[in-house]
Amino acid sequence: MANASIIANQTAIASVGDGNGVLRVYSLDIYGGIRETGYNGSGSSWWGGDKTIGTAKIGSPIAVASSPGLKHIRLYYISTDFKLSELCYDADSSGKGWFAGDLGSKGYQIAPYSQIAAAYLSTDQLKVRVYVQAPDNSIQEYSNDGSWYKDQNLGTAIPGSSISFISYGGNATSLRVYYQTPNLDLIEKAHENSGVWHTGEFSVKSAVTRAAISATVWTWSSGTGIRVYYTGANDVILEKANDGSWYDGGFKQPSVPGSRVGSLSWYASSTKAPEIRVYFQSGVQVTGITEWKWQGGLGAWNLGHKALPPATQ
């Protein structure tokens, strides 16, 4: 029976939700197996993590994109033959299970240490953007608006930089990509509908080398909230927040050295406040993935789950 020891140290962590408390978290095991753990909403229990849904190269990054309601899930990784690859799941054909997408056949070149970021655009159409590090260390965008094509280049990053991507604003789409520059600053590249990529206002100066980065966004009738989680000194996970302008958030939790970070959020109509989840390895059962949660109605960070399955519950 699987337990936390099957999960790789410094595993990639990717997370998505349906906007109503149904959650999915993806990680990598010590053999390169991709594992899915799920939570089906208030009152349910965490499940999964005991079998693989696909196989990546050992130590592969993972990124996941989902359409509203988790109707379409797309998972991106580096295959055992070192190709940028895609796994797909469609709820309306769930009996089919996970299946290979078209991206792996494109032969797009990526750096061997590349990380990956991905998300569906916040439009009423199924459009996906994927960001990787090219062999020249620049951040390259690949897009699918019905078929895959090479899109824009966002500039140079430190080799092995973490990458995170968010999209919001409906059909007037705003895009944000976060990565680490060669001078070790964490920066934001911003793109507005029909505009061009430019450097945004987010910045963390002289961050730790190859800091983990995970961004999440929610919207409601009065505006937009953005949170960026990143590795600070002494392996402490920190938060930058934007509810109109950037400020230092209150999240501060120790992680194991080199832990990756995943995050997700949504606006809860019942409490008229955001819900945030942050995932990382804190050392529980050595390599278990820990969940912390912000429930806006309570106004405080709390431990959500000490170690997700397959960790012993």
Image (cartoon, rainbow, N blue to C red):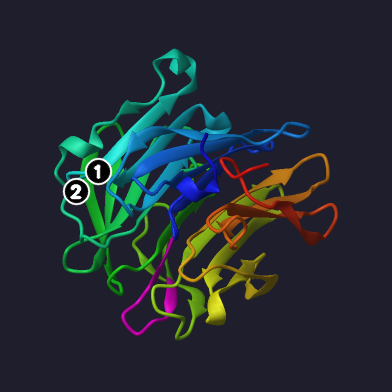
| SS label for mark 2 | loop
Span highlighted in magenta in the image: 177-187
Is residue 94 depicted above or below 69 in this figure?
above
Crowd rating for badge 1 (residues with CA inside 10 Å; few <14, some 14–19, many 20+): some
As rendered, which of 283 and 93 lies closer to the eye?
A: 283
Q: Are marks 1 and 2 in contact (CB under 8 Å)?
A: yes
Crowd rating for badge 2 (residues with CA inside 10 Å; few <14, some 14–19, many 20+): some
- Please check the rendered image and state whether residue 106 is part of the magenta-colored stretch, yes or no: no
Residue 175 can be seen, yes or no: no
> Mark 1 = which residue?
79
Distance between the alpha carbons at the discs numbered 1 and 2: 5 Å
| SS label for mark 1 | loop
As rendered, which of 155 and 41 lies closer to the eye?
A: 41
Residue drawn at 41 percent across, 21 percent down: 97
Residue drawn at 65 percent across, 36 percent down: 46
Q: Which amino acid type is marked by label 1?
A: Ser
Is residue 238 depicted above or below 60 in this figure?
below
Residue drawn at 85 percent across, 55 percent down: 298
Q: Which amino acid type is marked by label 2?
A: Phe
> Mark 2 = which residue?
82
- Residue 220 locus on image (x, y percent): 69, 48
Q: Which mark is residue 151?
A: none
Quadrant position of residue 263: bottom right
